[in-house]
Amino acid sequence: MPNVWENGALFTHYKVSTVSGDALNVTGALSVTGDINISGTTVTGDRLKTEPLGIPETPRVITVATGNTNTALTSGVHRISMRAAGTDTFYSAGTGTQTATLSGHFIANGERLDIAIPSNNPNIAVICASGSSGVLYVSELS
């Protein structure tokens, strides 16, 4: 099934909410508004909206230590994918300079998280959860 952009949203799959009766076989493109009735068989549904994660743009390696480290990200970035290596990490992501605290958001050593961030002056701050240092690998996604 081809990907379809519609009003700024990406649709990649179709969902069928009701099928009753005989099987429905379709070859080629099918465009339907409303329900389909075939010999007493009713198929209803709609397209599923999917949100693309993004294309990797700028990679970053941020040192995670016992002191707070803030890093400015590229303006206009809406999402990041990050992976903690070497230590459990607390982080804070937002607009402008951030301060990570030991009661903030958490990413475990070896874990990967994909998150949305504000695109206006995005920053991320990190601090290690224990005495050992490590790094946070960040991929900015467009």
Image: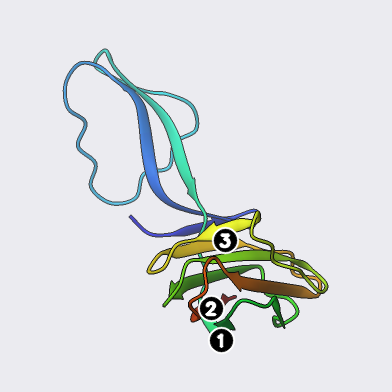
Label at residue 140 = none
- SS under mark 2: strand
Q: Secondary structure at mark 3?
A: strand
Which residue is disc 2 drawn over?
Answer: 138
Residues at badges 3 and 2 in contact (C-beta under 8 Å)? no
Cβ atoms under marks 3 and 1 closer than 8 Å: no
**Whole-percent x and y of residue 5?**
54, 58
Which residue lies at the image location 77% right of the left edge and 70% below the top edge?
98
- As measured in the structure, the alpha-carbon distance from the residue carrying label 3 to the one carrying label 2 is 11 Å
Q: Position of residue 39 (x, y in %)?
A: 24, 16
The reply to whether dot 2 and dot 1 touch (C-beta < 8 Å) is yes
Question: Which is more N-terminal, label 2 or label 3?
Answer: 3
Mark closest to the chain's N terminus, 3 or 1: 1
* Residue type at tag 1: Arg
Q: Amino acid at mark 3?
A: Ile
- Answer above or below: position of 3 versus 15: below
Check disc 1 and report the residue beneath it.
60
- Residue occupied by mark 3: 115
